[in-house]
């Protein structure tokens, strides 16, 4: 059966939720097919709890049929329960083949996506956050402290989370409810997870969905501390249970991002207080899973994700600006640590991510040292010298004497925003990595999250101006320092942007591929980042409606470096401004343009 088409903006997505499949995938998908035919179409199935069989013998039989293509998954299906004796073997190939960070799931066969670890992604307009795995000592099928830390950081980001998926139920869930008719499985204190309770209290989703207790339970909505909306908890039974408990449930929530303020504030008559308002009294908070003891020589500068967001003294995440240059324009207002010892290590070519987190996610592509010993740093003296030489002559490195600092609008931790040199239109800006990096697609996950905040802020600012933003980036083998171009376009021309890019491509003899067929912008960048090999030349454009168009450029292809600008110049009837060199203005005019932009952008600036 073909997957359902994406919902239109005016139609809320229709989502199926399922509990522990326990490897009974034929029964699960037979039921999904039946429901989809009778009351569908549904756009996705989200599975929580144990997805694979708990049996050691023959536990991979049904799952193998889908993974090997002998059976078909009826609609796009996302699962978090990556445990069970057969799970490591069934997921090994997908894990080995996965490149980069995949918040929207690792595809293990057609229509089946494994949500590994923890992350946030957009599904048909819905903001979905998940914690995969269960509480345990660590290893396959257990969530890690890194997974929990990542969600604590996400909880600090703007925007309402629509769905939070966990395998475990949160401790304290029934506090504040009438338990006289509550099933005994729910009153049993075993099988609840205090870490999940802490996370859901911080994330404050509109829906929290969990499995693992073999019972269906829909709790009364509850209010959230410091939030306008209510949360609904849905616990689902296991597939094919003998008690005929409900194991599949349908919802059709309107994404919070497009809801009216009145709808977000609405509270049903049976709304209760949050069961997590006073965690110290209501929830027994057990010690979170401990990470293995670190080698003292690594000097693992670990940080508390939540505290560093608020600039508390006990947080010790490093400030890149200070570490790389010895100064920080934010001074005492900086939320990050100014550590002289870390700066000394960085000056000896030690990787910033290694200093900051104790590990580097760039792999062999990283040009820096992953050791604090003098011996390790000396090995790369030549590359350090080369890096300093390159950065000193780079227009975009903030530490370079050539940087035109008067163009800078806002400085974050991983990115800064600046007025484009020779702008196509007055508010044409660039979002640029602070670190010397050839493409924004190569930046670490934390920086990608900050980029998302900048894009959200720019979107709000341009919307206030009656415009929408187009983002594009040209990455070639000769690229030195990445810069994501951001050009505001009047809303009246927004519907023509996609068409004119396709037309321009045809005139040059190529066709764009659409990276994210569902039109989810975050998903588009996730796919780009996971598939980019850092060796290819490419051009991509992020359109206002969410589509991401991609062109992989052959080594012998003569691709125009200003292609994106030329296309938009044509759209805006500004052909004479297609070349930035024709649009240079005086430094005084640039300063005035930056000041004007700052005045309107200040209320949205994520670095303020």
Image (cartoon, rainbow, N blue to C red):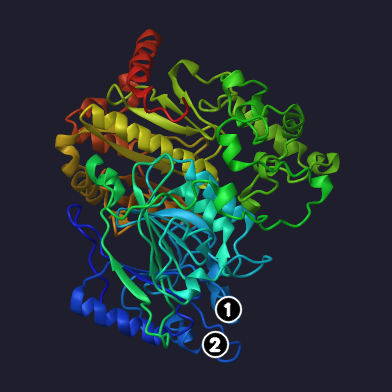
The residue at 30%/57% (across/down) is: 124
Say what secondary structure mark 1 lies in: loop
Read off the residue under disc 1.
84
The residue at 37%/84% (across/down) is: 244
Q: Quadrant of residue 314?
A: top right
Q: Quadrant of residue 237?
A: bottom left
Q: 185 left or right of 514?
A: right
Comparing 542 with 122, the one in front is: 122
User: Which quarter of the figure is the N terminus placed in?
Assistant: bottom left
> Disc 2 vs disc 1: Cβ atoms closer than 8 Å?
yes
> How far is disc 2 from disc 1 in space, using C-alphas?
8 Å
Q: How would you rate the neighbour count of disc 1 (Cα within 10 Å): few for under 14, some for 14-19, many for 20 or more?
A: many
Read off the residue under disc 2.
59
Which percent across, then down, holds residue 236? 41, 72
Q: Is residue 438 above or below residue 533?
A: above
Which percent across, then down, holds residue 66? 42, 83
Q: 241 left or right of 189?
A: left
The residue at 55%/52% (across/down) is: 282
Which percent across, then down, holds residue 207? 37, 57
Q: In which quarter of the image is residue 270?
A: bottom left
Q: Is residue 351 above or below residue 190?
A: above
Task: State whether residue 464 appears in this view.
Answer: yes
First in sequence: mark 2 vs mark 1: 2
Q: Residue 252 carries which label?
A: none
Task: State whether residue 535 appears in this view.
Answer: no
Furthest residue toward front:
180
Which percent across, then down, holds residue 499? 19, 47
Say what secondary structure mark 2 lies in: loop
């Amino acid at each position: 059966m073909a997957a359902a088409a994406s919902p239109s903006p005016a139609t809320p997505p229709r989502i199926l939720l399922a509990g522990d499949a326990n490897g009974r995938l034929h029964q699960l998908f037979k039921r999904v097919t039946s429901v989809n035919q009778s009351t569908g179409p549904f756009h996705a199935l989200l599975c929580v709890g144990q997805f694979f069989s708990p049996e050691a013998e023959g536990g991979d039989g049904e799952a193998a049929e889908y993974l090997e293509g002998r059976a078909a998954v009826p609609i796009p299906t996302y699962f978090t329960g990556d445990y069970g004796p057969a799970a490591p073997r069934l997921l090994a190939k997908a894990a080995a083949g996965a490149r980069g960070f995949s918040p929207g799931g690792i595809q293990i066969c057609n229509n089946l996506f494994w949500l590994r670890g923890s992350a946030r992604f957009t599904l048909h307009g819905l903001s979905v956050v998940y914690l995969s795995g269960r509480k345990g000592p660590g290893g396959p099928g257990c969530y890690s402290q890194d997974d929990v830390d990542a969600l604590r950081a996400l909880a600090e980001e703007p925007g309402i989370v629509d769905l939070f998926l966990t395998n475990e139920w949160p401790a304290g869930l029934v506090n504040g409810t009438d338990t006289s008719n509550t099933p005994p499985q729910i009153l049993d204190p075993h099988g609840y997870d205090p870490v999940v309770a802490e996370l859901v209290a911080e994330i404050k989703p509109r829906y929290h969905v969990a499995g693992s207790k073999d019972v269906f339970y829909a709790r009364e909505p509850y209010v959230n501390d410091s939030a306008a909306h209510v949360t609904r908890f849905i616990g689902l039974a296991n597939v094919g249970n003998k008690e005929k408990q409900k194991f599949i449930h349908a919802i059709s929530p309107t994404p919070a991002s497009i809801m009216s303020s009145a709808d977000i504030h609405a509270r049903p008559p049976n709304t209760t207080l949050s069961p997590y308002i006073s965690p110290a009294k209501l929830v027994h908070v057990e010690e979170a899973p401990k990470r293995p003891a670190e080698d003292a020589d690594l000097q693992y500068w670990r940080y508390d994700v939540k505290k560093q967001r608020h600039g508390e003294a006990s947080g010790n995440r490093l400030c890149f600006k200070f570490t790389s240059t010895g100064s920080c324009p934010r001074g005492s207002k900086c939320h990050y640590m100014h550590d002289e010892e870390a700066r000394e290590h960085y000056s000896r070519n030690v990787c910033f991510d290694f200093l900051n987190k104790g590990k580097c996610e760039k792999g062999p592509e990283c040009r820096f040292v992953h050791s604090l010993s003098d011996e390790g740093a000396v090995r790369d003296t030549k590359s350090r010298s080369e890096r300093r030489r390159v950065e000193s002559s780079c227009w975009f490195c903030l530490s370079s004497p050539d940087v035109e600092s008067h163009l800078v609008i806002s400085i974050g931790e991983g990115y800064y925003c600046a007025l484009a040199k020779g702008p196509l239109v007055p508010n044409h800006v660039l979002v640029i990595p602070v670190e010397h990096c050839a493409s924004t697609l190569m930046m670490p996950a934390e920086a990608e999250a900050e980029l998302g905040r900048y894009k959200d802020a720019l979107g709000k600012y341009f919307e206030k101006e009656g415009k929408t933003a187009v983002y594009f980036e040209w990455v070639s083998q000769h690229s030195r320092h990445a810069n994501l171009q951001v050009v505001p376009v009047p809303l009246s021309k927004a519907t023509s942007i996609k068409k004119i890019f396709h037309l321009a491509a045809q005139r040059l003899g190529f066709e764009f591929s659409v990276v994210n067929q569902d039109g989810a912008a975050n998903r588009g960048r996730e796919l780009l980042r996971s598939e980019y090999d850092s060796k290819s030349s490419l051009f991509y454009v992020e359109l206002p409606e969410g589509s991401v168009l991609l062109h992989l450029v052959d080594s012998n292809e003569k691709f125009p470096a200003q292609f994106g600008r030329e296309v938009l110049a044509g759209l805006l009837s500004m052909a004479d401004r297609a070349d930035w060199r024709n649009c240079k203005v005086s430094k005084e005019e640039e300063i005035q343009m930056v000041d004007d932009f700052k005045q309107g952008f200040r209320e949205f600036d994520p670095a303020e």
